[in-house]
Image: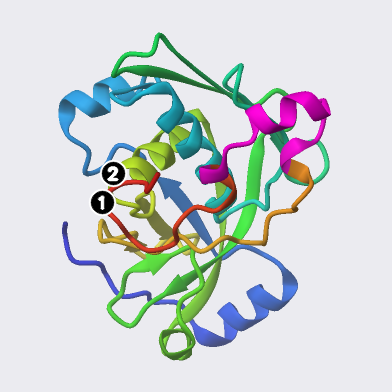
Amino acid sequence: MNPMHPIRFPSLLLAVALVSGCATHQLRLQPLRGLPADEAARLKQGQLAVGRDRLFDAAATTLEHEPFLHWDIDLLDRANGFIKASAGLFREVQIRVTGDGGPNSQLAVSVPRRELKTRAKIWIKPDGTATAYEPSAELKAQSRVVSADVELDDLYFYSFVWHALHDRAEVPFDLLSYDAEAPIAAAAPLALQPMVPAQAPSPTSEAMALSPAAQAAAVSPAAQALPLTPTPGMER
C-alpha cells in the first residue's frame, strides 16, 4: 500500500468545524481493495465461498461491529436466513443469506428506506493512517479526529462480511479533505483490527418479532457472543 500523505488542515478551522457539526472530510469506501481478484469478482455478486450458517453468523457480526451507524437488530431469523436491522429514523437494512448446504452461499443486502448516509468521527493515528474505530486510550491521546461524510451501500456490507470471515480487518477507505488543495489524507490499513462494538447489543432486540417457539432456533449463540480478538476466521 502506498504511504499516506500527512493531513494539511488548519487546526483552528478543524476545531470550528468539529464544534459546528460540519464535516471536513469525505470518506470514500474501497470495499474491494486488497481482495484476491477472483473473490472480488464473486463478492460483487454477493457470492462467498462459505457455508450458509457461517455466512449468517458473519452477517450478524457485521451489524454488531459496523462502526458508522448504531444498528439495532429487529429480526434475526436463522431458519430463513433473514436479518433486519434499523439505525435511527428511516434507516434500515435487510440481509438475506441463501445456500444449498454446500461450500458456497449467496448474500443479498437491501436498503429499502432512507439511504445510509451519515457523518462519522475518524481517528488519524500518528503513523498517518485512519480508522473509524476508537483507538486505545494511549493511542487516542496521540491521534487527531476529523468529521467525515460517508455513505454505505451493499458492496460495503459484502466486504465487511468477507473481512469478518477472513481477517477481521477494517473495510478499506480513502479519506479526502474538502479542502480542494489537500491530497488524500489517509486510508484504512489492511492490518488486523479488533472490531469493537459501537454499542452493546440489546439482549432482547435479537429475538424481536419472533415467536417464542422460533426464538431458540433462530438466535445463534455464536451471533450473541462473538470473539473480539483479531483471529484468522470466526470462532464457532
> Closer to the N terminus: mark 2 or mark 1?
2
Residue 200 is a magenta residue: no
Q: Are marks 2 and 1 in contact (CB under 8 Å)?
A: yes
Magenta-highlighted residues: 206-222
Q: Is residue 28 above or below residue 7?
A: above
Residue at image location 59% in from the left, 60% down from the top = 120
Q: Quadrant of the C terminus?
A: top left
Within 10 angstroms of label 1, few (less than 14), some, or many (20 or more) residues? Answer: some
Q: How much space separates mark 2 and mark 1, taking CA atoms?
A: 6 Å
For badge 1, the amino acid type reads Pro
In this rendering, would 229 be left or right of 151? left
Residue 166 is labelled as 2
Classified by dominant secondary structure, the portion drawn in magenta counts as: helix
Residue at image coords 33%, 83%: 126
Indicate the position of residue 58 as horizontal and vertical percent values: 45, 38
Q: Position of residue 143 (x, y in %)?
A: 43, 83
Residue drawn at x 35%, y 50% is 172
Tell me, yes or no, if residue 91 can be seen here.
no
Q: How is the image coloured?
A: rainbow
Residue holding disc 1: 232
Name the amino acid, label 2.
Answer: His
